[in-house]
Amino acid sequence: MAKYLAQPRHPSVCTAAAHRRLLMALAALAAFAGGLPLVPQFALHGSAVARLSVRAPPRLRASVRRYASSGEAALQRVYDLSAAGQLPEAAAAMDALTAEGLAVLQVPQAPDVGYQHVYEDHAMSIGIFLLPRGSAIPLHDHPGMTVLSKLLFGRLRVTSYDMPADRSSPSKTSMLNPFSRGRSAVRFRCQPPRTTIVAAPCSTLRLDPLCGNIHEFEALEDTAIFDVLTPPYNDRAGRSCHYYSIADASLDGSDKVELVEIPWPQGLSIVQCAYSGPECGPHQ
């Protein structure tokens, strides 16, 4: 997934296991203290976080361990169900995920959109999008894929189109540059879009190879979205990510909308952010 959105994950002290635990401990400390808001700058000063955790009394340290372990268990359950192909159950399990349990503390500064890589294999990818208020992920598709999206916090305007049935199967020609010489941009017609506003907490969103497969996210508040893609984007398998613009909203008196494929959208900047939450995968 990250290949299509940002630079590959870069190892750093921010992704080390010790730092991950400290960030989760900070989230637990805030929850234990009565739901006090997190202070994001603590995440930038590991020594301050370390002092907080070291000085905590035994009862508080026990609470920290329970809170961190519950986030890890919830994430692993989502992975296990998704890997088994039990996507309705995985979507239900995602309702138990929280920003604190995944150590999601803040979003990048606008206009950048952040992406945290959590897990990827040949069958799925898992990640977290971080959208500052006013930012957007423009209209794009998910060829032959099912995607589960859980809002960890924030509020979104979601505009989605159904993929026409004759375009729902991935094509290996999609790995070719659609803007190379001698090849015209792809155009096709869709039914009118659906536009909804969703706010956390809410049920997990789902799209499949046909229903809602082409969508756009606009952040009305600072927003974090936990995503599971099955299968993941893969150029060689014909599952490239394509972006679109509206070419014509009313052709021949029809209410259908014509979409045209475009290059990487101007103004879209997706940056890789270190993930400091629990891990998941086989045999965790």
Image: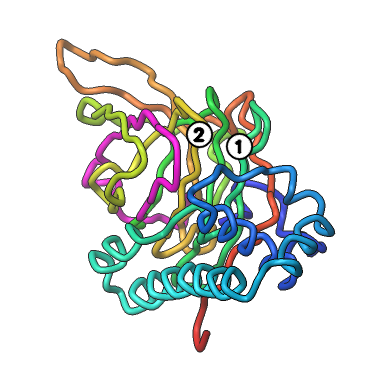
Vertical order, 42 against 158 (above or below): below
Q: Position of residue 123 (x, y in %)?
A: 44, 72
Residue, disc 2: 137
Q: Nearer the viewer, residue 200 or 193?
A: 200
User: From the viewer's perspective, is 169 left or right of 98?
Assistant: left
In the drawing, does residue 130 fall left or right of residue 242?
Answer: right
* Vertical side of 79 occupied by 240: above or below: above
Residue 164, x across and y down, in percent: 24, 41
User: Where, by quadrant of the figure, is residue 113 drawn?
Assistant: top right
Percent position of residue 182, x then y:
56, 33
Q: Is residue 205 above or below residue 83?
A: above
Residue toward you, 104 or 184 = 104
Foreground: disc 1 or disc 2: 1
- SS at mark 1 in the image: strand
Q: Does the CB distance between marks 1 and 2 fall below 8 Å?
A: yes
Q: Residue at x 57, y 34 (%)?
A: 179
User: What stretch of residues is rendered in magenta?
Assistant: 148-174
Q: Secondary structure at mark 2?
A: strand
What residue do we see at 81% from left, 58% from top? 46
Q: Which mark is residue 113?
A: 1
Magenta-drawn stretch contains 161: yes
- Between 266 and 52, the one lying in front of the other is 52
**From what the image shows, is residue 231 above or below residue 173?**
below
Crowd tier of the residue under label 2, counting other residues whose Cα lies within 10 Å: few below 14, some 14–19, many 20 or above: some
